[in-house]
Amino acid sequence: MLKSEGFTTRPGKGSHEMFACPSGAHKVSVPTGHKTISPAVHAMVVKAIAVCDCGKD
C-alpha cells in the first residue's frame, strides 16, 4: 500500500521497516515478520498516505 503511493523503505530498528514519503516529511514504522498488522498500524499507514501531498497535482 505504501510503496504504491510512492513511499520508500529503509531498515528500521529490530523487526520494523521505516517508510517515508518522497519528500521525507511523513514517515511511518511498520512491523515486519507478522502475517497481519494491527488495526492501529493500519490506521497509521492510512493517515500517513492521507496527509502526504507529495507528488499529487
Image (cartoon, rainbow, N blue to C red):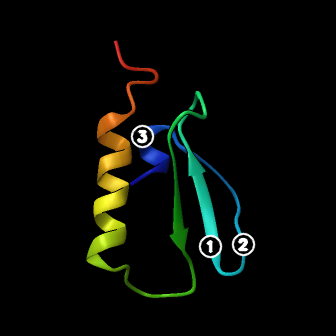
The mark nearer the N terminus, 1 or 3, is 3
Residue 23 or 5: which is nearer the viewer? 23
Circle 3 SS class: helix
Inspect the image, locate mark 2, and give the three-letter code of the amino acid beneath it.
Answer: Lys
Q: Are marks 2 and 1 in contact (CB under 8 Å)?
A: yes
3 or 39, which is in the foreground? 39
- Kindly identify which residue carries mark 3: 5
Name the residue: 35% across, 43% down.
Answer: 49
- Position of residue 26 in the picture relative to residue 10 (left or right): left
Residue at the spot 45% in from the left edge and 24% down from the top edge: 54
Distance, label 2 to label 1, CA atoms, is 6 Å
> In the rendering, at what x and y percent does residue 55 appear?
45, 21
Neighbour class for label 1 at 10 Å: few (<14), some, many (≥20)? some
Task: Indicate which label's residue lies in the foreground, 2 or 3.
Answer: 2
- Classify mark 2: helix, strand or loop: loop
Which of pointers 2 and 3 lies earlier in the amino acid sequence? 3
Residue under label 2? 13
The answer to whether residue 41 is above or below residue 6 is: below
Label 1 sits on residue: 16
State the separation of the CA atoms marked 2 and 3. Answer: 23 Å
Residue projecting furthest to the top:
57
Tell me the amino acid under the disc marked 1. His
Q: Secondary structure at mark 1?
A: strand
In the displayed structure, 7 sits above or below 37; it is: above
Of discs 1 and 3, which sits in the foreground? Answer: 1
Q: Amino acid at mark 3?
A: Glu
**Quarter-wise, where is residue 36 in the image?**
bottom left
